[in-house]
Amino acid sequence: MNFTSDNAAPAHPAIIEALARANVGHAASYGADAMMERVTARLRDVFEAPDAAVHLVATGTAANALALACLCPPWATIFCHRQAHIEEDEGGAPEFFTAGAKLTLVDGPDARIDPDRLDASMAHANRLGVHNIQRGALSITNVTEAGSVYTSEQVARLADIAKRWNLPVHMDGARFANALVATGATPAEMTWKAGVDALSFGGTKNGLLGVEAVILFDPEKSWEFELRRKRGGHLFSKHRYLSAQMDAYLTDDLWMDLARAANARAADLARGITDAGARLLHPADANMIFAEWPRAAHRALRDAGAKYYFWPGDHSLDGPDEAPLAARLVCGWCTTETEVGEFLAAMKTSPAIA
Amino acid sequence: MNFTSDNAAPAHPAIIEALARANVGHAASYGADAMMERVTARLRDVFEAPDAAVHLVATGTAANALALACLCPPWATIFCHRQAHIEEDEGGAPEFFTAGAKLTLVDGPDARIDPDRLDASMAHANRLGVHNIQRGALSITNVTEAGSVYTSEQVARLADIAKRWNLPVHMDGARFANALVATGATPAEMTWKAGVDALSFGGTKNGLLGVEAVILFDPEKSWEFELRRKRGGHLFSKHRYLSAQMDAYLTDDLWMDLARAANARAADLARGITDAGARLLHPADANMIFAEWPRAAHRALRDAGAKYYFWPGDHSLDGPDEAPLAARLVCGWCTTETEVGEFLAAMKTSPAIA
Amino acid sequence: MNFTSDNAAPAHPAIIEALARANVGHAASYGADAMMERVTARLRDVFEAPDAAVHLVATGTAANALALACLCPPWATIFCHRQAHIEEDEGGAPEFFTAGAKLTLVDGPDARIDPDRLDASMAHANRLGVHNIQRGALSITNVTEAGSVYTSEQVARLADIAKRWNLPVHMDGARFANALVATGATPAEMTWKAGVDALSFGGTKNGLLGVEAVILFDPEKSWEFELRRKRGGHLFSKHRYLSAQMDAYLTDDLWMDLARAANARAADLARGITDAGARLLHPADANMIFAEWPRAAHRALRDAGAKYYFWPGDHSLDGPDEAPLAARLVCGWCTTETEVGEFLAAMKTSPAIA
Amino acid sequence: MNFTSDNAAPAHPAIIEALARANVGHAASYGADAMMERVTARLRDVFEAPDAAVHLVATGTAANALALACLCPPWATIFCHRQAHIEEDEGGAPEFFTAGAKLTLVDGPDARIDPDRLDASMAHANRLGVHNIQRGALSITNVTEAGSVYTSEQVARLADIAKRWNLPVHMDGARFANALVATGATPAEMTWKAGVDALSFGGTKNGLLGVEAVILFDPEKSWEFELRRKRGGHLFSKHRYLSAQMDAYLTDDLWMDLARAANARAADLARGITDAGARLLHPADANMIFAEWPRAAHRALRDAGAKYYFWPGDHSLDGPDEAPLAARLVCGWCTTETEVGEFLAAMKTSPAIA
């Protein structure tokens, strides 16, 4: 019963097997391995984007920061949600890789950027010419940090605003597969057809050891990306081990199957806990649930061995039985129906809930 | 018969097995995994350095650049050999991570820094106060880029010069194990006992998929390192897969065994080719050989399927049979006696050699 | 009748005379001129800070950005008001000089930081360790961008919060003299006695051609400041022309006299326009007035030749006579009673006001 | 008798007068002053470059670093002479403003870049693709740091090499007027007609208080320059005082007159000291002389009150009478025939010379 994080989950066995298969003989280094060619072809196919440039890195922070550095000059600002991962959880990597660009924080419910606020924010940013930080890029996180999901139409609406200001659009898709499962959009619909120029296509949270693809739908910046990746220490000499992971991930739709499983478990869990009286704090659209319920039930869950994070702030289980406490529950590709069942059973043993 | 690069070699099977073993259940993310504790303890033990800070990254460039950024401020210069990897092969990563520090290039035969030139270079660097770039750090590569090795005494001599100028010392040990095998020095003797403050302890070129440890013998900068690593996108969420590799590498002296094998094959090969009439361009102290021999023999080797790089410059096999052409031959942990034998046999078939 | 900006005002004649006097014979360059010694001594005296380090630069942006770079590492954030000059008007200079630090924006009425929000913001910033941007420094602007002033007690309250989080405090004193005049605080009371570690001591807006002093009350970072200034291209070879300006500025309390004049004119003007029916948008504590009044009166003022900026946003004079429009009026050391009188007279001719 | 530096010299009186004249009433700030329009028109005229972009900054380091940052991306290298000011005397400013570009040092006699070495250096720089620092720009200093001058043909030869590698060319013209006087080339011939893309057009060393123009012959990067200047803290609010200096400098060919005077005095001085037995270390083409002569004569000069720097290295006057010691003598616009005469007279009193 571990719902702490999709980062704490193991990799899918097929990925380990792919590594073992790739571990034979010599292979060209630094991205020139034959498997990388196949990965590129597969992703172009998946995204209906025959010209897209594809590059692999090992962490989501690297994917985001390198992509943004290609889109936004040092003297400009990246518009993103206040709770975006690039603002809250990457230790200043976007600022580092862009050589000092700013992040302009836009609000909106459920960690989704409010279109009107985005427009106002862009209008404000650069109203006095050289004195102001310039407008740089828009970054959209899908699945959001609150577990909600943008539909492709919602993405398009934000991207349209950015385009009116002549700005490129980045999508942080650390949980991209989960967003597709949640919305039914195709990869192309969710990205370039909606106006996205660069995508961080996540794999790590969805069953890989550590690989993300950066997809540049306009390949013009591809060489710049390569130079930035090298200089950022993110070009792997034994690149085949990144390629092998991504290749297996894309084989037979494994990536979508894993996300489907995670989302399905989260849906079961969300239904179960709301039935049990918990209150969802955000729409549980994908594989993350933010909800609150009485402390007594938290205590019962702890005693039953359930693991998850309180979120945010107050970490103390102390307090009256009925006092609510918020938590984050994350399902991964590996979360089982049994685990969900045990969690719900434990929750229901609590008198405060029942 | 592949002597192109230790980066093109596969990982040792024990490493893949360790990944498979680590791939069970949930594990704390971002370096808080239990295996990382063991890695730290093992490396402290190996280096007789109970207080040393240990951090893992996935590429040698990241290891070097992050370590140097902790040692050298943006307004200072890093003294290194003209052929150092940080100067020639890292795409400007040291400049990026230090936020604009300079590299001051020092010459010396066989890619080893000449002590007198180092001292003169340090004296020159900062003679006019605020106008000059300041003296920052010394970086020594061992095994060097020419395949030669510094003894621990030679390291100490360079480090002493740095200390006289109050400068910290970094060692790029991408092939550290090979240097130990070549010299017989202990890890401690080759590093902190000789005056090294920070070591990039390589694993990738010696049998791992992609892991290097940065060892800070004075742990004072450990937290700064962590902040820089995070911000550089080099902190792995599923860190256990780095820990597992390094743990297996350190188990039962695997790391030294692999280096011993590589060095032994290179010694056989060096002996064989010099016996066959090739001329060594640098001492083949470890697992790399730089040598030249007649084009006819190169052509014979090509026909026999031998793979290696010409080095540097002229890449054309065309030319008179007896005209020499230089090459680099790298042995890895996986190079077999059979491969070496076949190479030497092919070489000897050439009339120009015989 | 020019109330556009203290940046559009001329320099005080005594400053030009000082330049002429300094322009005799050779003088040591790069800050080693004899006049700089006197400037340092004078400022230490004025601030009752015998150990303070003093450095001159030519622009306020350079002063702020260099000072902040000495206080805040690249992986940390500077807390400031949302309307702070460093956020709104310096084109990203703080991000550039700090090598990528962030600015965290805190709200509060009249461009003054609200203490509770500051504390909450600092608590939020770094709650998850290495993943978050770290807490770096607090920057307070006095006079604020809204023309209001912090008392030294208000400064101390904010600085106390910063100190509780172990953060250094910077003051952007582009209009420092005006803040002293407004509050009656001594230079020491407004700065180090209240917890300020580094001050941008403005001269340009108060009668100089272009000189600001950075005062580091703890001189420990003085050498780092010099290195950063040089590397930022802000060390003047013919430094005597900066020294001469600052020296004249400090002679016979000229700097305070000029601020007194500007504040007095602004007070007259604020009184006059409110008497005439205008509404102050912020307290007009120093030499800047933000107010709104009917469009008809704006038109009358325009016809009379008055110059000032609408602020912010709607720049159109079109609209109903009685529809209010906001403006910023700035008085400088050179604003005359006659100008103020003419402005008020012109305003009163408008039927909408009367 | 002060031959220490053109940075220690005063400004020309006409410049102070121009400042006084400019100091009347309000003026548009941040470069929008009317005088700046005239400066731009004048410089376009002088350079026969009607489309050139012109921007003013206050220091030579800012001019060079900002210009180079517009020409060279962070992952590339600037080719310059080993003794170039940007390498030796700017405290790392080029690395700072370019966000980490490298400087590749090329040798050549008399601080002039050797064309063959330049070509070889460019060929070497980027031979392995993404692993190497990329080729960025060429920077030529004229007058050189050794006092020699490139003819426009020599500039063209170096620029041609750069163009073959598709690289832009920068000229550090801190002493540009002196180079024109020395060669008789027109401003256009020495710059864009020879292949120079961006010029740091010096004023400070030639009679101004502190102003340099950056001239971009292709104005495409003009807006980027403005953004970089602002963000570097180099945009002056009271910009009129920069414009006024440059305007006066360009009026009635003052800039050329001042350089003519300085070069003439240096020519007299060089002739005189070689007649007296000194040995020139570099051609004294412009206003700087590098020469060595016996210590006895140095002592005689010191006793007569002559001021100049020993250059480089050994600063001790101690030693045998006849032992030579090298020195740098700089003439400025203000150096008088009397001073030169006194210097030569003092030199000749020395028995070691006579």
Image (cartoon, coloured by chain):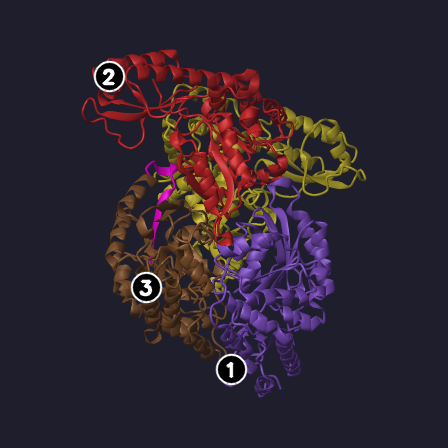
Chain colours: A purple, B brown, C yellow, D red
- On the image, numbered disc 2 is attached to which residue? D353
In space, the residues marked 2 and 1 are separated at their CA atoms by 95 Å
Circle 1: is it few (<14), some (14-19), or many (20+) Cα within 10 Å?
some
Q: Is residue A59 magenta?
A: no
Left or right relative to A57: residue B333: left
* Camera-nearest residue between A45 and C286: A45
Does the magenta portion include B130? yes
Q: Nearer the viewer, residue A350 or C236?
A: C236
Residue B97 or residue A117, whichever sits in front? B97
Give the distance between the C-alpha atoms of the residues marked 2 and 3, in whole angstroms.
Answer: 66 Å
Please give the residue where the numbered disc 3 appears in the rendered image. Answer: B272
Whether residue C182 is visible, yes or no, is: no
Magenta-tinted stretch? B126-142
Chain letter behind tag 2: D
The local secondary structure at tag 3 comes to helix
Amino acid carrying label 1: it is Arg
Same chain for mark 2 and mark 1? The answer is no
The lab-note entry on whether marks 2 and 3 share a chain reads no
Residue labelled with disc 1: A302
The quarter in which the N terminus of chain C is drawn is top right
